[in-house]
């Protein structure tokens, strides 16, 4: 497939509003692709270059993009930035700039989908002092060979924001339709492989194998997620529930095969080097090949410390031993996904818990089986007294569903309700804050799109605001007056008093009295609240459900 054809498909999809129509269009394309092209096309159409589990990162920021396009078009970086500011869309702006270049130059060569991917691999592989120079040369070459429409989607792929609305769910359905396979089999394989591109290839080559796919050590899968909920509702719906402490720590996934142990963050990044003590503790606690799910908690004198201490350990890449002396962390394991070559995800939680207790000698998080609200609330009170965030209330029969935020696991915390939201824009402050961002535009996700749900400006000290500016200033991709558009890479936890229906934001909702809580450095933009979950919260709120 020529990259121009891919770009035309994207342009066509961008003009379609109905999800079912988009699925039909993509499903018609998939069978005609070559085996090498199929996984790449599937990832690209979701706005991704590499699988979620892969350690490869493109690492192309707005400034490198500006420099590359400026060189190709024969203008200054400032002119590229101004063009992007005028449109608010890097892809459309670069398309217009390349259209001007097209009138005075010839294409060096046609761009092939595979060749574009191989160039992306070269960009990701660039390391060392000259890496930015190497990345720039490859990106220049790509734009030099690009037709204007190709430039639109090259730029968006580099920023991993395709803007055509093809999320994982839609692509999963398209794969199932293209190869006439039960969508549940596609989902099963995707949960284990964590790469819809590979799943699509397997669906074509050997559909029967989809049901036999298993997870593998050192290939992390997405972690099962929880929704906010209540103790009373869970017990009413399910009778017996498993109650666990909700730690104010950071999620991890521990993989062990033989004597090799590795640990991954919630964002599926390997952090073995940052947490050698956790790796040692868990490696010594079992003789089996395992994949474990748990939480890293910072402690001092036996009491849990706030999340900020934990994340300092996760971020540390140098002088790790010194940081280990300053911040003690311990693992709390609450699930097992794999044991000695066998996937356990489809087994009920109660059975996984029994297996976990048999194979792990230490570091298992407490779990309590209860059937009455009073008993569960007593555990909730105990968790708070011990310094934890609250409790998790899980259904004992629940399978482990990677990446799914369902009602089988709910979290119960006191105080204000919070949401994890993507930061997609900002506005310059005033007065003493004039040289920093003063407010931030937030969004939920909906099938590959990020839809605004409001702005947050309260709950942020001047010191924190300075830190946020340092974190986000290089992510600016467009400016318009006092407002900037940001490359969506950062997640905020935001408290609110109420969710309101609102025509002012594309999500259809707005947050009443939003308040900044913290940056969720352990979370990726793909993990922010979904529009469906927000709508559910809105419905529950109208029905007057309580916090417990």
Image (spheres, rainbow, N blue to C red):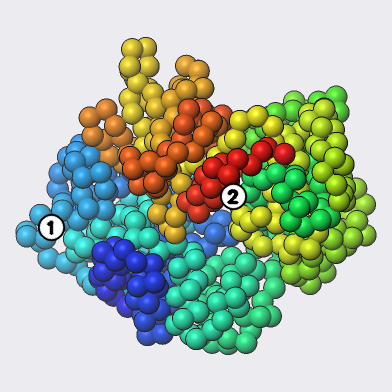
Q: Quadrant of residue 195?
A: bottom right
Please tell me which residue lies in front, 413 or 230. Answer: 230
Which secondary structure, mark 2? Answer: loop
Which secondary structure, mark 1? Answer: helix
Residue drawn at the location 30% of the way across and 54% of the way down = 155
- x and y, in percent, of residue 47 in the image: 40, 60
Regarding residue 265, the answer to whether it shows in the image is no
Give the labeled residue for mark 2: 267
How many neighbours does mark 1 have within 10 angstroms: few (below 14), some (14-19), or many (20 or more)?
A: some
- x and y, in percent, of residue 468 in the image: 46, 28
In the rendered image, the quadrant that contains the N terminus is bottom left
Rendered view: 500 above or below 371: above
Q: Quadrant of residue 26?
A: bottom left
Left or right: where 489 falls relative to 12: right
Please tell me which residue lies in front, 388 or 355. Answer: 388
Left or right: where 360 falls relative to 27: right
Give the labeled residue for mark 1: 99
Q: CA distance from mark 2 to mark 1?
A: 38 Å
- x and y, in percent, of residue 533 in the image: 54, 51
């Amino acid at each position: 497939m020529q990259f121009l054809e891919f770009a035309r498909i994207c342009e066509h999809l961008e003009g379609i509003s109905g999800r079912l129509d988009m699925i039909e269009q993509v499903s018609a394309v998939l069978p005609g692709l070559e085996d090498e092209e199929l996984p790449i096309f599937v990832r690209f159409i979701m706005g991704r270059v590499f699988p979620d589990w892969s350690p490869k990162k493109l690492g192309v920021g707005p400034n490198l993009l500006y420099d590359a396009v400026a060189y190709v078009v024969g203008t200054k970086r400032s002119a590229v930035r101004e063009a992007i500011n005028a449109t608010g869309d890097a892809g459309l702006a670069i398309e217009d700039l390349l259209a001007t270049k097209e009138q005075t130059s010839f294409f060096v060569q046609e761009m092939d989908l595979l060749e574009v991917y191989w160039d992306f691999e070269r960009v990701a592989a660039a390391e060392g002092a000259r890496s930015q120079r190497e990345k720039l040369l490859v990106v220049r070459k790509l734009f030099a060979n690009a037709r204007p429409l190709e430039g639109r989607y090259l730029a968006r792929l580099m920023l991993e924001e395709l803007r055509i609305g093809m999320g994982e769910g839609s692509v999963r359905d398209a794969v199932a339709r293209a190869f006439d396979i039960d969508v549940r089999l596609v989902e099963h394989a995707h949960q284990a492989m964590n790469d819809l591109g590979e799943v699509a290839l397997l669906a074509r080559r050997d559909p029967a194998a989809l049901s036999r796919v298993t997870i593998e050590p050192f290939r992390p899968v997405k972690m099962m997620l929880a929704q906010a909920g209540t103790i009373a509702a869970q017990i009413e719906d399910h009778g017996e529930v498993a109650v666990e402490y909700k730690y104010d720590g950071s999620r991890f996934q521990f993989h062990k095969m033989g004597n090799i142990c590795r640990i991954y963050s919630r964002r599926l990044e390997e952090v073995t080097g940052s947490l050698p003590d956790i790796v040692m503790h868990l490696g010594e606690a079992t003789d089996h090949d395992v994949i474990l799910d748990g939480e890293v908690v910072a402690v001092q004198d036996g009491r849990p410390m706030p999340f900020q201490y934990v994340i300092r350990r996760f971020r540390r890449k140098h002088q790790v031993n010194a940081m280990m002396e300053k911040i003690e962390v311990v693992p709390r394991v609450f699930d097992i996904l794999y044991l000695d070559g066998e996937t356990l995800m489809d087994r009920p939680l109660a059975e996984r818990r029994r297996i976990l207790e048999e194979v792990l000698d230490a570091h298992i998080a407490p779990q309590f089986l209860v059937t009455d609200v009073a008993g569960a609330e007593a555990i909730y009170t105990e968790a708070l007294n011990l310094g934890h965030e609250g409790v998790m209330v899980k259904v004992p029969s629940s399978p482990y569903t990677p990446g799914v935020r369902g009602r089988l696991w709910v979290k119960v915390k006191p105080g204000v309700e919070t949401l994890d939201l993507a930061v997609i824009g900002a506005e310059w402050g005033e007065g003493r804050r004039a040289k920093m961002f003063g407010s931030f535009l937030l969004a939920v996700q909906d099938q590959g799109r990020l839809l605004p749900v409001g702005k947050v400006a309260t709950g942020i000290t001047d010191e924190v605001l300075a830190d946020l500016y340092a974190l986000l200033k290089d992510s600016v991709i467009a400016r318009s007056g006092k407002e900037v558009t940001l490359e969506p890479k950062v997640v905020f936890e935001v408290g609110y008093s109420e969710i309101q229906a609102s025509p002012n934001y594309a999500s259809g909702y707005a947050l009443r009295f939003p308040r900044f809580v913290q940056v969720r450095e352990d979370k990726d933009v793909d993990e922010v609240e979904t529009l469906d979950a927000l709508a559910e919260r809105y419905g529950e709120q109208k029905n007057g459900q309580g916090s417990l």
